[in-house]
Amino acid sequence: MNQPRLMEALTVGTDDAEARIRELASGLSLEQQVRLLTGADIWSTHTLPDIGLGRIVLSDGPAGVRGEDFDERHDSVSLPSPTALAATWSVDMARRYGQILGQEARRKGVHAVLGPTINLHRSPLGGRHFECMSEDPRLTATIAAGYVEGVQSMGVGATPKHYLANEAETDRFTADSVVEEQPLRELYLAAFEDAIREARAWLVMSSYNSINGTTASENDLLETPLSTEWGFDGVVVSDWTGVRSIDAANAHQDLEMPGPAGHWGPKLIAAVNDGRVSREAILEKVTRILRLAARVGVLEGFKPAITRLPAELDGAAVARDIAVRGAVLVRNRDGLLPLDVGSIRSVAVIGHNAEEARTQGGGSATVMPKHTVSPLEGLRKALPDDVKVAYARGAKVAEGIQAFSRADLHNPVSGVAGIRVAFHAADGSEISGEDRLASHLIWFGVGIPEGTASIRMVTDWTARTAGTHHIGVGTVGKIRLAVDGSDVFNGELEDQTNVLGAALFDPPATIHAIETAAGQMVRIEAEYRLPEEQFIPLTAILLGEDTVVDNPHADIAAAVEAARASDVAVVVVGTNAAIESEGFDRTDLDLPGFQDELVSAVAAANPRTVVVVNSGSPVLMPWLDKVSAVLLGWFGGQEFGHAIADILVGKEEPGGRLPTTWPAALEDVPVLSTTPVEGKVVYSEGIHVGYRAWLKQEAAGGAAPALPFGFGLGFTSIEFGSAHAPQCVPAGKDVVVHVPVRNTGNRTGREVVQVYLSRPETAVERPVRWLAGYAGTHLAPSGTESVEVRIPARAFAHYDGGWQFEPGTFTLLVGRHAADDFQELDVELR
């Protein structure tokens, strides 16, 4: 079939363009239409040259755009985790974050970014907590909208996910989230609403789980409120393998990924022909896909939605800025920070994560940056040359084998740095080979030539130190490992978890001890035999070294000595991808290994101890009151070390405020469990999630958190004047609160004015208080500003079969965090 080309391109969104898109869709045969509804492969959609339709390429992820492969040679900007982004409490920073992702997508030929991840921090044990933004729907919604605006300003689609009530990873493919109507609307849907209604996202991803008994890809929520009330006209794409049956075609699920095999295809054609699925439903889905293609510029005859791109941003600079703006200072006894570099002569930098920082979480959000900066490296560059910097590991963090440092690898075949990888046919002949830079290799859908039966890898690894090294390989399947020409393993490694994220980033391994001299080169070879059949073409192989500590107390003692001999000790503690990842939830909030003992011992030896927490989500800090300063750096992206150093030496102000509550003890957390019971995760807490749950618990005499939602310190002092707002407002109208602020310190600083609402006298189920609006300001010393905080009308509403307004008195609470001593202003809602 040949469609005539248009002489003049139509502008997407106009009536003429919409009519033409629907005409193209309706002109296709049923077979052509259905073919467009399932992906062509792992990452892209089908083409249809007859109508000028190119492929739409989708890519992870929320904190960096990987493209169609996991190849480290195709590097990506690695931004701080979305928890760090939300900690900026800045929509402007979210736009810049999104713009970097849009730039990266265009550079990599990607048309849709699979992010932002909007699910709420319902439990701190959630495995993808780091990838989500906040426990509060208002903060999440505004940051997510800014992110979407930034991505789509580059002509690239953003994909808010995972719709809906997908706050845990345990049994994520089958769990049923049971949520009553009020919390579903006021919390979980509200978190998505601004990204759809205000920012006009071009895609939405449906989740794996069920909501109230119906799997997400078949759920009526895809129609109402998404398409009806919110006016969503984009593409609902499934999470990968998230379409389970033909029933999804009767919902507003538009695109099944991945392809080409799936639950639709010929089965869907048969369902249309026998009347189980209407032709109108198919036409609507195809129209949406063609509309997306027109928006991103892969449908001939249409101008892309964005034809004039904003000025290009420096990805590394933005990554560094967001890491600074999102870092949260939660303790600073006696003003130790910023460090007085003019009087310091020595600094002890301590901690496994100081040298091998965790800059991103595990799972599909992972990207391959060209470089990462550790806190140790950042401090060495930031401190004056005459300041002595001593390093001690102190306590092991990373469990299992970790990829070899690229600097220690030499490719013996090509004579360059790295590793040689060769693909062999069943008869042993080489199909092709390539020079790789890293020893952690992942192929997901692309990269392995057809006909490959085995993959062979060889590298010469240089041992930096003398002694025993524990060398190994991790994968799922049949593998042979040889060291200096001798096989040390030839067998099969089995995945006991059946969790995709674990198989990719923390695979089962075989580890073998070898003795080396310092600087000795060791030939390491591995051969992986591909399985005969794979439902999803996924292969991951990790060559590396396991850090084995025979005497952990000796490591702590060495760190203590380094701290005692230094003017200041900086201890970097944290987690890793084996703890925080897609595919599984956490079992506790403890720092792994002996890190708590390490911090306590160092603080006892040197009262001038600063702790930097390198985690994507909350951890317990039993030593919080024993140290002088604590800075939460999150998973800080590729520039993490520079950002942390900038703050510690006073070049930058820590700009962050907590986007989620941090507990003092696991048993104190009011909403904790992520584990389904008889297949169901019951959201029995209703509207009381995050700080709302903590406030309800405290009101009943229960425990308070270690650090409240919205909390964060700075390096200066800022005072609030008397806030003012209208005393009476009609229901359905926004309210503007004006708050005078003044910097009374001697440094430029940032403040976030937070306004909460409460309604003690009410006939409706409400939280003790809830965030209604916020605004940030930067002030020079003695600077003043009247900060304007806009409270949307919806903040006063509750959901009961529809959005309702309860007339009467609401109290506006103006402060710095959810547990502050607030200024109170009464507002009468008519």
Image (cartoon, rainbow, N blue to C red):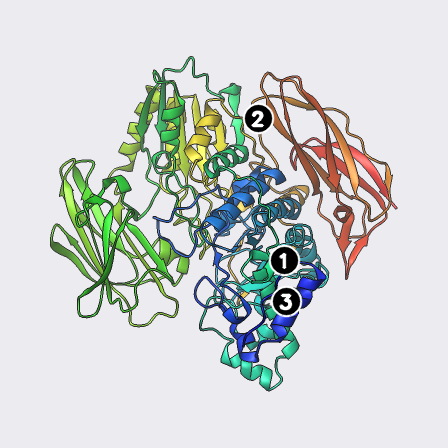
Q: Secondary structure at mark 2?
A: loop
What residue is shown with label 2?
714
Residue 474 in view here: yes
Picture quadrant of residue 607: top left
At a point 39% along the width and 67% down the height, the residue shown is 536
Residue 597 vertical placement versus 16 (above, below): above
Amino acid type shown at disc 3 = Ile
Percent x, y of residue 44: 47, 63
Determine the residue located farthest toward the top in the rendered image. Answer: 343
Q: Secondary structure at mark 3?
A: helix
User: Which quadrant would the N terminus be assigned to in this image?
Assistant: bottom right
Label drawn at residue 387: none
Upstream in the sequence, badge 3 or badge 1?
Answer: 3
Is 636 left or right of 475, judged from the image as shown?
right
Alpha carbon distance from label 3 to label 2: 53 Å
Numbered disc total: 3
What residue is shown with label 3?
21
Picture quadrant of residue 820: top right
Mark 3 or 1: the one toward you: 3
Is 265 left or right of 369, judged from the image as shown?
right
Residue 682 in view here: no
Determine the residue located farthest toward the bottom in the rendered image. Answer: 274
At a point 60% along the width and 37% down the height, the residue shown is 708
Percent x, y of residue 434: 26, 54
What residue is shown with label 1?
684
Q: Nearer the viewer, residue 287 or 801?
A: 287
Alpha carbon distance from label 3 to label 1: 45 Å
